[in-house]
């Protein structure tokens, strides 16, 4: 009942947000002069409905399609649309917001699904910058590195990578929970396998199932009555930005890259890499699991990948390397 009430409330918020703006009635071959996220959503959704009638808007398949397009640009026909960049800004925000719900009441147990419905989103309605502005912003991006000294046990990149390969296409349950939007949960498991111990809140057993924090990092599995397998987790273990903040503050080096080629030059086995659209939020976490000399490969959950070439990552992304020590 609590979950159903939450969905109804979110649906009302969504409806009020999107009915307050003008959107195009169907996707077209031209881009409106001033494109909002509502416009981009409308064009993208009409394209998907036309070309992929088996995909229901707001479903898990919809999320998977958007994730694939953001990460590897799998639909070349979509990529050729004049409004593609605007659509990818919307897709980025949709995926990022779905990932921000990981661990919510609606999807915490290992059998439940993420709430993929648009009702889970309350998108801002600001205009999206133009394609040229996006390109210019990418060219002018400053690439920097922030380093720190880790106060914790040494990290083994090879052990983290080995775990990533072993579990790339399946799930280490019941030791860890299974989520449909699982990317950061997966890389956290890799980091733990690489030698980084959990940092528990002193009162973690009495906290909520998912505790919002960037000061602690843990996933605690215990047995109960119904369901049998239950978990206590920090958001830093399962959510993209909280993972980044925790490790930035606990000794990781942060290296930002504006291009795939730069990423290939900078990255190392065992590194965690996060992605975002040039004009969007950070939405995805992967781990580098093999390769050398500019020919690295990654593994990931949320559209599972095992030793996929880094070169397949879409050029529409920025990247940040989280190098744990």
Image: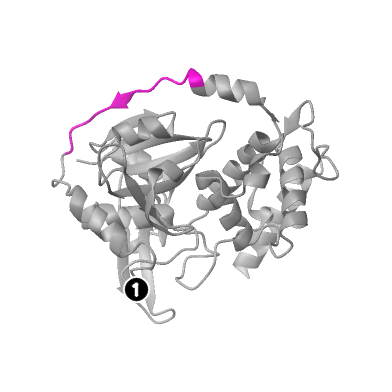
- How many labels were placed on the picture? 1
Residue at 60 percent across and 55 percent down: it is 65
The picture places residue 116, in percent across and down from the top left corner, at: 61, 58
Can residue 200 be seen here?
A: no
- Residue 117's quadrant in the figure? bottom right
Residue at 50 percent across and 63 percent down: it is 180
Between 46 and 174, the one lying in front of the other is: 46
Q: Name the residue furthest bottom.
A: 225
Is 121 left, or right, of 286 in this rendering?
right
Asked whether 146 falls inside the magenta stretch, the response is yes
Residue at 22 percent across and 31 percent down: it is 148
Is 230 left, or right, of 291 in this rendering?
right
Element type at mark 1: loop
Picture layout, residue 121 above or below residue 261:
below
The overriding secondary structure of the stretch rendered in magenta is loop
Picture layout, residue 236 above or below residue 232:
above
The picture places residue 137, in percent across and down from the top left corner, at: 54, 21
Colouring chosen for the image of the structure = one colour
Which quadrant of the rendered structure holds the N terminus?
bottom right
The stretch in magenta equals: 139-150
Picture layout, residue 47 above or below residue 249:
below
Which quadrant of the rendered structure holds the C terminus?
top left
Asked whether 23 falls inside the magenta stretch, the response is no
Between 227 and 205, the one lying in front of the other is: 227
State the residue position of label 1: 174
- Residue 24's quadrant in the figure? top right
Q: Name the residue furthest right.
A: 25
Residue at 48 percent across and 17 percent down: it is 140
């Amino acid at each position: 009942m609590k979950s159903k009430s939450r969905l109804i409330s979110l649906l009302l918020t969504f409806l009020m947000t999107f009915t307050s703006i003008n959107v195009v009635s169907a996707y077209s071959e031209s881009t409106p002069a001033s494109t909002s996220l509502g416009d981009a959503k409308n064009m993208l959704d009409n394209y998907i409905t036309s070309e992929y009638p088996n995909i229901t808007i707001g479903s898990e398949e919809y999320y998977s399609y958007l994730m694939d397009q953001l990460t590897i640009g799998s639909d070349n026909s979509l990529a050729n649309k004049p409004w593609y960049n605007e659509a990818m800004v919307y897709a980025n925000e949709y995926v990022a917001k779905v990932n921000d719900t990981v661990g919510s009441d609606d999807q915490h147990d290992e059998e439940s699904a993420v709430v993929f419905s648009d009702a889970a989103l309350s998108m801002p309605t600001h205009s999206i910058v133009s394609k040229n502005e996006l390109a210019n912003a990418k060219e002018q991006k400053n690439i920097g590195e922030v380093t720190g000294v880790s106060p914790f046990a040494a990290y083994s990149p090879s052990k983290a990578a080995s775990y990533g390969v072993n579990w790339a296409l399946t799930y280490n349950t019941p030791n860890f929970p299974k989520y449909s939007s699982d990317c950061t949960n997966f890389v956290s498991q890799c980091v733990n396998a690489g030698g980084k111990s959990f940092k528990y809140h002193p009162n973690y057993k009495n906290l909520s199932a998912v505790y919002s924090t960037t000061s602690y990092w843990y996933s605690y599995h215990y047995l109960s009555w119904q369901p049998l397998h239950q978990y206590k987790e920090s958001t830093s273990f399962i959510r993209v930005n909280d993972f980044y903040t925790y490790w930035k503050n606990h000794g990781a080096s942060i290296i930002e890259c504006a291009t795939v080629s730069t990423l290939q030059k900078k990255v190392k086995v065992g590194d965690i890499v996060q992605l975002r659209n040039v004009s969007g939020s950070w939405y995805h976490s992967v781990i580098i699991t093999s390769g050398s000399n500019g020919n690295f490969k990654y593994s990931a959950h949320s559209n599972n990948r095992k030793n996929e070439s880094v070169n397949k990552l879409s050029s529409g992304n920025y990247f940040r390397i989280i190098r744990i020590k």
